[in-house]
Image (tube, grey):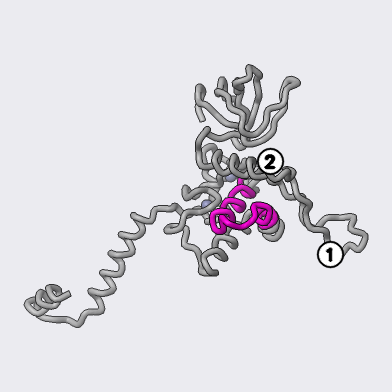
Amino acid sequence: MLVGARIELTARIDALGSTAHPGEQGVIQEIHAGGHYTVRMDNGHTQFPRRNEMTSPGSRDAQLLGRARAALAQLGEGPTAPGRPDGSDLNGWSTGTPEIDRTTLAWAAAFTLLTDHQPDARPLAHVAGADAVLREEGVRGIATLQSNLAGGAPVDHRFTRCAYCGGHGEDPTFPTCEERGCLPKYEFVGHDHGCPVCGGEMWEPDWYGEQQIRYCDGLLADALPPAPPGRLVRLLRRA
Ligand SMILES: [Zn+2]
Ligand SMILES: [Zn+2]
């Protein structure tokens, strides 16, 4: 995200008496220390989003968020869902889990996984499903969901694209070290925060596939009985 780059907001922000909504676009004018950006929005207003409140237009994140927003708008569903009440409190005064924010990338990722898996189901069922995924386990629920949809098999994110980060292995919400609870000695500029869903695995099926084939070749070669060179050539020819 450099000066001059076009951006799309992923969160609602307010500045100088005007409000900008997710999906609205603008151009970066200035980058400030402390993580804020000056953005001139297409409607002429200026906003000051942080890195985790914007993305590139047309990016995978923008598409997931746009799709979730459109579905919610069409169904007349709000941007939040109630959390889960604390079962130990009979009066229901305290909540066990916080309100579900349906404007987050995590919610959009869960909704998209469910919708792509069962395109014929009622969209409202997927809204309720995405709420439940985040209510039960938070962001980690996406990993559980991805595994469940694969029949309960463990998902190897080197070969299956992570539904949250899209396979690059970095936390797609660009949290600060403070938000992630990094030790102070790690708070240097430019250190990556691994994706909480895939654990930072890179989605590179071709590269890992070849590596896997070489590994299996090695196992096979070790398992073959020692044979004189002439016989080995004949064996390989037959294979
Ligand atoms: Zn950190
Ligand atoms: Zn990931």
Q: Is residue 215 magenta?
A: no
Residues shaded magenta = 105-130
Q: Main secondary structure of the magenta part?
A: helix
Q: Is residue 138 visible?
A: no
Image point 55% across, 69% down: which residue? 152
Q: Mark 2: give few (<14), some (14-19) or many (20+) Cα within 10 Å.
A: few
Q: Quadrant of the C terminus?
A: bottom left
Q: Is residue 2 left or right of residue 221?
A: right
Corner quadrant of residue 71 = top right
Disc number for residue 87: 1
Report the Cα–Cα distance between label 1 and label 2.
32 Å
Instruction: Give the residue furthest to the top.
Output: 44
Out of 130 and 237, give the one closest to the viewer: 130
Q: Do the CB atoms of the residues marked 1 and 2 lie less than 8 Å apart? A: no
Instruction: Give the residue furthest to the right.
Output: 91
Q: Position of residue 206 (x, y in %)?
A: 34, 55
Name the residue type under label 1: Gly
Q: Nearer the viewer, mark 1 or mark 2?
A: 2
